[in-house]
């Protein structure tokens, strides 16, 4: 699967299928700090991501004061 | 996993609620939590005119959308801060939302109307970018609300923002700031009421709200904010939250009920005068915003020629500082 990361923008390849929470653990990303989106759809931590999927890991932490 | 409410497929898990939600029940949760915050803290009523401080980011667009969904009379206000492509893109997100929703968006462009932008203005005024930006936004939001006859200014500060501010204030025991940290500040002496209806919702929920509602917000972080202290506090709190879900909520909301009253300070209305330049309420002859504008728009001296010896350079720095201060009222 292809995993799209931001800040900075980069792609990471990872063999699937894998659960979302396993993917985040392997990337050392805290679950609270991101959304995981597959084909425009939000997926929860226990979702199984197939090998041919493109996964967006979108950070949600903003540093300004809104 | 299934939605905790209806057993339909879930799209998001919220660990502090130990619950999963489908799109419909998650969006309802966001509306309900916002309405509860508004009512619990008596932020505003259905007849009030609300001005939402919009940045083009997830929180401000989400709170604007939720208020409109709940039937409040809410207009948006966006400031072009002149932070390169980032400001242009974020302003465009705000415009696109307003157009798509048929909502009213007021705009001010800082470089056009006040002659400076945040990157160069903060440098000239010897402030951090976030400090200059915050001061600028507070002043212009207040002015827009007063000029436009709005009853309240709403900002998109969420649970994570407020918990991080509280963490910083407690860490350094800024008791004066602790006394002012409130989800609603009453109107006083020419300043509008201010409210933060998202204090029961985290920023992950706000991003999810936008994705589920199809609200296109600016995902990129402000380039000026990278590495600031606020982000470090959020990182620390998220480490605690990962091991103890609900810790951030308890930290902030129990502060409001159990500790905040002890830090409250007496009403300061009587101590405020008017800025002799812009008329805004302030505690000096000239308000901090007008001083910032003056420094940001005053040409800075440029030293040419060979480098001076250390002793001479120190003297020059002292002289420059005196000159700069001399311009300040």
Image (spheres, coloured by chain):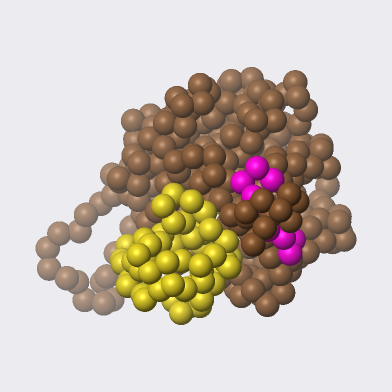
Chain colours: A yellow, B brown
Q: Nearer the viewer, residue B302 or B327?
A: B302
Marker count (numbered): 0
> Magenta includes B98?
no
Q: Is residue B159 left or right of residue B110?
A: right
Q: Is residue B19 left or right of residue B279?
A: right
Q: Determine the residue positioned at 12% across, 63% down.
A: B305
Q: Determine the residue positioned at 76% across, 31% down.
A: B44
Query: Residue B308's quadrant in the figure?
Result: bottom left
Q: Determine the residue positioned at 75% across, 51% down.
A: B5
Residue A33 in sight in this render: no
- Image spot of residue B91 (x, y percent): 40, 36
Q: Determine the residue positioned at 75% across, 24% down.
A: B46
In the rendered image of this protein, does residue B234 appear above or below residue B155?
A: below
Q: Nearer the viewer, residue B189 or B325?
A: B189
> Magenta includes B17?
yes
Q: Is residue B123 left or right of residue B183?
A: left
In the rendered image of this protein, does residue B182 appear above or below residue B315?
A: above
- Image spot of residue B18 (x, y percent): 74, 64
Magenta span of residues: B16-25
Position of the N terminus of chain B by quadrant? bottom right
- Image spot of residue A54 (x, y percent): 36, 61
Q: Is residue A14 left or right of residue B39?
A: left
Residue B57 in sight in this render: yes
Query: Residue B110's quadrant in the figure?
Result: top left
Q: Nearer the viewer, residue B257 or B134?
A: B257
In the rendered image of this protein, does residue B282 appear above or below residue A63?
A: above
């Amino acid at each position: 699967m292809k995993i799209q990361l931001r800040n900075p923008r980069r792609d990471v390849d990872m063999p699937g299928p894998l659960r979302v929470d396993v993917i985040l653990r392997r990337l050392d990303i805290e679950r609270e700090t991101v959304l995981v989106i597959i084909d425009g759809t939000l997926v929860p931590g226990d979702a199984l991501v197939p090998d041919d999927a493109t996964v967006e890991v979108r950070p949600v932490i903003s540093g300004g004061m809104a | 996993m299934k939605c905790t409410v209806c057993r339909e497929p879930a799209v998001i898990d919220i660990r502090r609620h130990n619950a999963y939600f489908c799109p419909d029940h998650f969006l309802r949760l966001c509306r309900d939590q916002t309405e509860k915050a508004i009512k619990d803290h008596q932020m505003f009523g259905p007849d009030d005119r609300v001005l939402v401080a919009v940045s083009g980011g997830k929180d401000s667009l989400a709170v604007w959308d939720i208020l409109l969904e709940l039937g409040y009379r809410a207009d948006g206000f966006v400031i072009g801060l002149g932070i390169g492509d980032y400001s242009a893109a974020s302003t465009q997100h705000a415009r696109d939302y307003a157009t798509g929703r048929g909502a009213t968006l007021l705009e001010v462009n800082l470089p056009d109307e006040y002659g400076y932008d945040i990157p160069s203005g903060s440098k000239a005024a010897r402030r951090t970018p976030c400090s200059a930006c915050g001061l600028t936004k507070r002043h212009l939001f207040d002015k827009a609300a007063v000029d436009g006859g709005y009853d309240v200014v709403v900002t998109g500060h969420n649970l994570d923002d407020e918990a991080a501010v509280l963490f910083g204030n407690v860490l350094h025991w800024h008791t004066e700031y602790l006394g002012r940290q409130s989800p609603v500040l009453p109107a006083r002496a020419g300043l509008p009421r201010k409210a933060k209806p998202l204090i029961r919702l985290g920023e992950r929920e706000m991003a999810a709200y936008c994705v589920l509602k199809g609200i296109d917000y600016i995902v990129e972080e402000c380039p000026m904010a990278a590495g600031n202290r606020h982000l470090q506090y959020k990182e620390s709190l998220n480490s605690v939250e990962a091991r103890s879900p609900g810790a951030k909520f308890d930290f902030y909301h129990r502060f409001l009920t159990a500790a905040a009253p002890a830090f409250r300070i007496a009403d300061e209305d009587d101590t405020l005068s008017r800025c002799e330049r812009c008329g805004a309420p302030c505690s000096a002859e000239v308000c901090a915003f007008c001083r910032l504008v003056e420094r940001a728009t005053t040409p800075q001296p440029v030293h040419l020629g060979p480098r001076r010896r250390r002793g001479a350079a120190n003297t020059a720095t002292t002289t420059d500082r005196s000159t700069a201060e001399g311009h300040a009222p």
